[in-house]
Amino acid sequence: MLTLPLNHVIESQQFDRNLLEIVFQVADQMKADLLGERKYAKALDGKIMASLFYESSTRTRFSFESAMLRLGGSVITTENAREFSSASKGESLADSTRIMNGYADVIVMRHNEAGSAVKAAAVSRIPIINAGDGAGQHPTQALLDMYTIVDTFPKFSGLKVAMVGDLRYGRTVRSLSYLLTKYEGVEIVFVSPSVCRMEADIKEYLDKNNINWHEETDLKKVAKEVDCVYMTRIQKERFHSVDDYKAAASKYILTPEIVQTMKQDAIIMHPLPRVDEIPAEVDTDPRARYFEQAQNGLYVRMALLFLLLQNN
Ligand code: CP
């Protein structure tokens, strides 16, 4: 039986190649099961997932909730935990976590502050799954991103990935960078406005793990050369300066003209939501994978919940 020897899912660095393959194998099983036998339909019968979201979400929250329901479990939740949980009365995250331990078997938590998932895990007997903590990490997004990449490029040799947009405040590119180090021959090109370049801690981690990376400013030049263009939204809500935001907004747009120059077997990814960085005309290009990527989130999150809770 496949198991995941983790108490919590907090950051991408927790996943080595072996754990990634376990998650992806179970995600494949979940995908096949949803289309076929439905033998996992009661796999988590009697289990309760608390979704505690202090920040807005469409994909992460609904795919986790759908995943739990499709596995036969139940979900307890609050609309906007910042406003409608007792956080609004000043309750600490640690106290809220301790209380939720008595009501649920797993907590999926999104928070506006980096490091909040670590704080919650420190006082939690039940698994905490980090569904995004400020500009910190979004490990389950990275898992579904990697699942999508591996599904497209099963041999995965010498793959060149461009990460484009807000690399400073975008937590998905940080988490994905960690996972890419688990595969041989990867090269990463960072393309961003100067006010939101990738942070030094990630660059140092890539160096330590012998991953080739460099920075570019010309998206037209880079798009032709890479196997995967991973676009991201400029995270307006995390900028401290309006001038910096204005300097970054709408700077990198993957136009249909640029897409025309990409390799035929390349792919376009985006964690979504998007603003203007990928025009809707690109959606019908067979290289556009962002909706499939979001769908894969369901299978990967079913796999994670199953692996964390099956024997718990
Ligand atoms: N990709 C992602 O985290 O989307 P949501 O903010 O809608 O959850």
Image: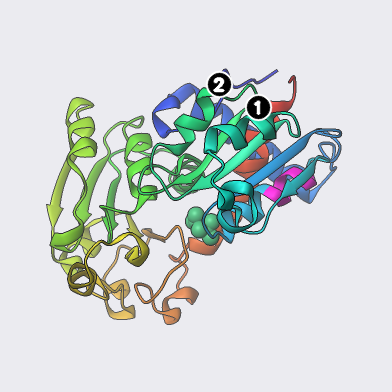
Per the image, label 1 sits on a secondary structure element best described as helix
Helix, strand or loop: magenta stretch: helix
Q: Residue 291 at x, y = what percent?
A: 54, 63
The residue at which mark 2 appears reads as: 6
Q: Residue 135 at x, y = what percent?
A: 35, 48
Residue 138 in view in this figure: yes
Image quadrant holding the N terminus, namely top right
Q: Earlier in the sequence, mark 1 or mark 2?
A: 2
| Residue type marked 1 | Leu
Residue 9 in view in this figure: no
Image quadrant holding the C terminus, namely top right
Q: Are discs 1 and 2 less than 8 Å apart at CB?
A: yes
Q: Residue 23 at x, y = what percent?
A: 57, 32
Looking at the image, which residue is at 55% across and 21% down? 6
Please report the bounds of the magenta region as a residue range: 65-70
Above or below for 257 versus 44: below
Q: CA distance from mark 1 to mark 2?
A: 7 Å
Image quadrant where residue 220 sits: bottom left
Above or below for 134 versus 270: above
- Observer-nearest of 202 and 147: 202
Q: Residues within 10 Å of mark 2 (few under 14, many from 20)?
A: few
- Observer-nearest of 176 and 106: 106
The residue at which mark 1 appears reads as: 308
Q: Residue 96 at x, y = what percent?
A: 61, 37
Looking at the image, which residue is at 76% across and 45% down? 75
